Image (cartoon, rainbow, N blue to C red):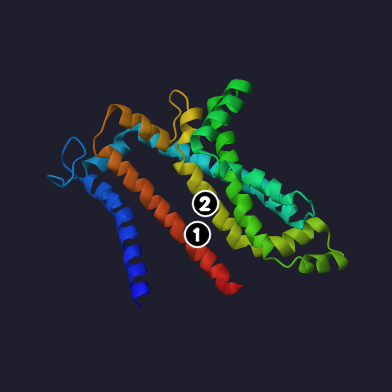
Amino acid sequence: MRKNRLLTAFSFLVFMFMFIPLAIIVVTSFGEGSTIEFPISGFTLKWYSNIFASRTFVSGFTLSLQIGLAATILALIVGIPAAYALSRSELTGKSRIKSFFLSPTIVPGVVVGYSLYQFIVVSLGIEVYSGLLLGHFLISLPYVIRVVGSSLEQFDFSIEEVAWTLGCGKLRAFMKVVLPNLTSAIFAAFMLAFINSFNNIPVSMFLSGPGVRTLPAALMNYIEYYYDPTVSAVSVLLMAGTVVLMFLIEKTMGISAVNK
């Protein structure tokens, strides 16, 4: 009993240690002062209106949304077949191949961003928008392979093989038998990949160009010249969006677990 209480108290302290800084950001986003201060001297919503009045932030949000959706859809188109192939194959080095696909999630973000800059911009000379799309696709792909691959590990492929023996072609069997069982995993993979793309800073900073910046990159550029509560307001909106998407992922995976 005492051990459980200690664990509960420790968990509460860890939660508070993580929650308090986030709460301070929320509070400072409503401060009246021209600089970020805590506690705040008064309440105002002008910093949130400042976001929507700023062409930089609006265009950054639009670009982040476009790049995030496009990169995630491409990652699904490539990642689902790749995860399926890895799950069905009997390659001796399959675990190493999986590790290779997941390497962008392990290597530090700055290293990934710099290496993609050298490859996409310096070596290939790809223009900014296409470079951002390619870079975000490469960092989104591992999430699709990981989530969909984990779901496929629980799938009984004998069902698909039965469909083959009944005259169903392999592509049709995949579309009619396998794919419907991956709906929740695909949705979760889409959300995780999109969150990672939308909130990404290192890759976006390296691959952005003049007038072409995603929202996180625009925020980092803004901080270099200003340090007013607009920074907190943008951070709050990013946190709120992420929380909503993570809730949807948890809800979807929970429903999937119940159905199984």
Image coordinates of residue 52 in percent, x first then y, are: 32, 39
Is residue 20 visible to us here? yes
- On the picture, is 131 further left or further right than 198? right
Q: Which residue is mark 1?
A: 249
Q: Which of marks 2 and 1 precedes in the sequence?
A: 2
* Residue name at image x 57 percent, y 70 percent: 257
* Residue name at image x 45 percent, y 57 percent: 246
Image coordinates of residue 93 in percent, x first then y, are: 75, 48
SS under mark 2: helix
Image coordinates of residue 164 in percent, x first then y, are: 84, 64
In which quadrant of the rendered view does residue 184 lie? bottom right
- Distance from the alpha carbon under mark 1 to that under mark 2: 8 Å
As drawn, the residue found furthest toward the bottom would be: 1
In the depicted view, which residue is nearer to us: 218 or 155? 155
From what the image shows, is residue 112 above or below residue 17? above
As drawn, the residue found furthest toward the front would be: 2
* Residue name at image x 56 percent, y 57 percent: 187
Image coordinates of residue 131 in percent, x first then y, are: 57, 30
* Residue name at image x 44 percent, y 60 percent: 247
- On the picture, is 160 further left or further right than 24? right
As drawn, the residue found furthest toward the left would be: 41
Q: Are marks 1 and 2 in contact (CB under 8 Å)?
A: yes
Q: Amino acid at mark 2?
A: Leu
SS under mark 1: helix
Q: Which residue is mark 2?
A: 192
